[in-house]
Amino acid sequence: MKKTGYVIWSVVFIAPWLLAYVFLPGKKIELTCQSNYEMLKSVSGGGEARSYGTMTSYYHSDGSGISRYAGMLRIGGSSTKYQQFSVHRVSNFNYEIIGAFVKITSQQNSKYVDDNADESAVAEYVYSGFKNGSVEYLKILKVGGNAFAAGIGVMPRIYCEPISKSVSLPR
C-alpha cells in the first residue's frame, strides 16, 4: 500500500513537469538589446549609490547570450566622501523563453582592465546578473513594429530589436 502511494504521488508531481519539458520546449530567439542605464539606491548610513552607463546584450538562437556594461558607479553621501569607480563588465549567460518571460542564468562574468569596482558593490548596486549563477526573469513586451522591451520592476527598461526578421514572441 505504501509503495502504491509513493508511485501515485510521484506521478502526480513529476508527470506535469515531464510533459511540459517534452511538449513545450523553450523558444530561442535572436535579439540585440541596448539600454542607457541609470540607477540610484540608498546605502547604509544615509548615503547613496548611483550607477550609470550603457548595457548591450545579444541573445543567440542557441540559447546563449552575452551582455556588456560600460559605465560608472558612485558611492557615498551623508557622512562619507563620494568614491567613483569605472565599471566595465561582460557576462555570458544562457536564456530560455517561458511564456512572456525570459529566464536568464548568468554563467561567467569578466572584468575589463579599466574596471576598478568591487565585485560585491557591482552585484548590489549595478546589476545582480554580474554574479555567476544568478537567475533573473525579465518580462517581454512588443512595443511596435519588430521592437521589444524587456525588464523587471527594479531595473531600467531594455529595448530590443530582432537580428532576424522571423522573431515571434507571446503577446
Image (tube, rainbow, N blue to C red):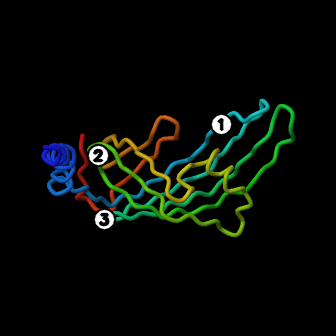
- The image shows residue 134 at horizontal and vertical percentages of 50, 53
Q: Residue at x 71, y 40 (%)?
A: 49
| Image x and y of residue 165, in percent | 26, 59
Rendered residue at 60%/61% (across/down): 89
The answer to which of marks 3 and 2 sits earlier in the sequence is: 3
- Quadrant where the N terminus sits is top left
The numbered dot on residue 61 is 3
Q: Quadrant of residue 41?
A: top right
Left or right for 157, reference 24: right
Residue drawn where x is 74% and y is 45% of the image: 74
Disc assigned to residue 145:
2
**Relative depth, front residue between 21 and 63:** 21
Q: Percent from the top left, x then y, of residue 62?
A: 31, 67
Could you give the CA–CA distance between mark 1 and mark 3, rounded to whole angstroms? 34 Å
Q: Residue furthest front?
A: 1
**Mark 2 or mark 1, earlier in chain:** 1
- Is residue 8 toward the left or the right of residue 59 in the image? left
Measure the alpha-carbon separation of dots 2 and 1.
32 Å
Residue placed most toward the observer, 42 or 56: 42
Instruction: Give the residue at mark 1.
Output: 40
Determine the secondary structure under disc 1: strand
Looking at the image, residue 82 sits to the left or right of residue 170; the answer is right
**74 vs 167: above or below:** above
Q: Residue at x 77, y 29 (%)?
A: 46
Q: Amino acid at mark 3?
A: Ser
Give amino acid for label 2: Gly
Q: Amino acid at mark 1?
A: Leu
In this rendering, would 105 be left or right of 14? Answer: right
Give the mark toward the camera: 3 or 2. 3
N-term mark: 1 or 3: 1
- Residue 76 percent coordinates (x, y): 80, 40
